[in-house]
Image (tube, rainbow, N blue to C red):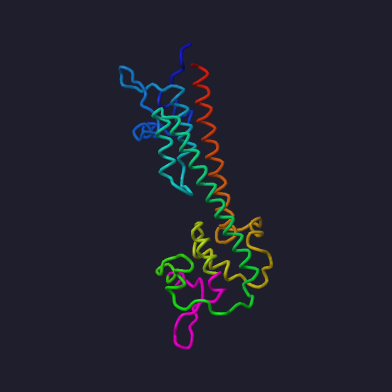
Amino acid sequence: MKQPTYSTKEIADLSGVHPNTVRLYESWGYISSPQRLKNNYRVFTDLHLIQMKLARTALPGPYPVDGKQVHQLVKEFASGNLEVSLDLAKEYLQKVQVEQKRAFKALSILDDWFVCRYSQYDDVLIKGRKKAAQEIGVTLDTLRTWERNGLFAIHKDDLGKLTFTQQDLEKIEVIRLLRNCGYSISSLLRVFNLSDTVQEKPSLLLSLPGNDEDFFYVTDRFVQYLQDHKERAEHLISMIEKYMQDRDSRT
């Protein structure tokens, strides 16, 4: 049975892109080079259509983790290195899942801090910015940046030495976790400046409607963003495995 073929425009229409995108994907190695007719026109096959669909699923960014790995798995698939492509897709899924765990851990710690933010535990545990940075696991410059941006207040003893209480250190730990998860400084400022009239925990407020300037909406988008990439990675794995199964059934 003769395999169907497609022109550049036809493969572009079937993939939902402009013909120039097809040419770019070929030049970048996202799809394999098609055969050409005597008039130099490209002739695409069903394999190219599968490659285009895989690329269109994988490539839209930004990525929560290693974007280079995503691009590489597309190139490996186009080159026929299916096992390598599948391994990269599975590895990418694992990385996204790790990011999800980190994000939920950060929100849990934020909830705990939010409830206890006015508790009485003001005993000084550490003196000096450098020791505080080492305790939290951030650089001195990072700690200074957070200070300058007003994420936490500076306290000094009678000798003018910076002091950090348990409450200070827990708040900085919350800041570190949320910053590592991609939350902006402005978002953190909003949640730390919440009025006493707000009774719910931050993570419980995620279901409430918000605008682009609302911290909880930004957080909700980040959590959903990770979930979207998890589902995308799972879909890529499914696409690659299905192609491999179909190929094996034909041989």
Residue located at (49% from left, 37% from top): 57
Q: Position of residue 104 (x, y in %)?
A: 59, 55
Q: Is residue 216 above or below residue 154?
A: above
Q: Residue at x 50, y 38 (%)?
A: 90
* Outermost residue to the bottom: 158
Residue toward you, 33 or 143: 143
The reply to whether the magenta stretch includes residue 25 is no
User: Residue pushed farthest top?
Assistant: 1
The x, y position of residue 187, in whole percent, is: 53, 63
- Specify start and end residues of the magenta stretch as a single range: 145-170
- Image coordinates of residue 69 in percent, x first then y, are 42, 42
Q: Nearer the viewer, residue 129 or 185?
A: 129
Q: Tally the marks.
A: 0
In the foreground, 226 or 18: 226
Q: Residue at x 44, y 75 (%)?
A: 129
Vertical placement of residue 52 versus 192, above or below: above
> In this picture, is 164 found above or below 134?
below
Instruction: Please state the horizontal and vertical placement of residue 50, each as a whole percent of the image.
Output: 48, 28
What residue lies at 54% left-to-right and 79% top-to-bottom? 124
Residue 151 on the magenta span: yes
Q: Is residue 88 left or right of residue 222?
A: left
Q: Quadrant of residue 121?
A: bottom right
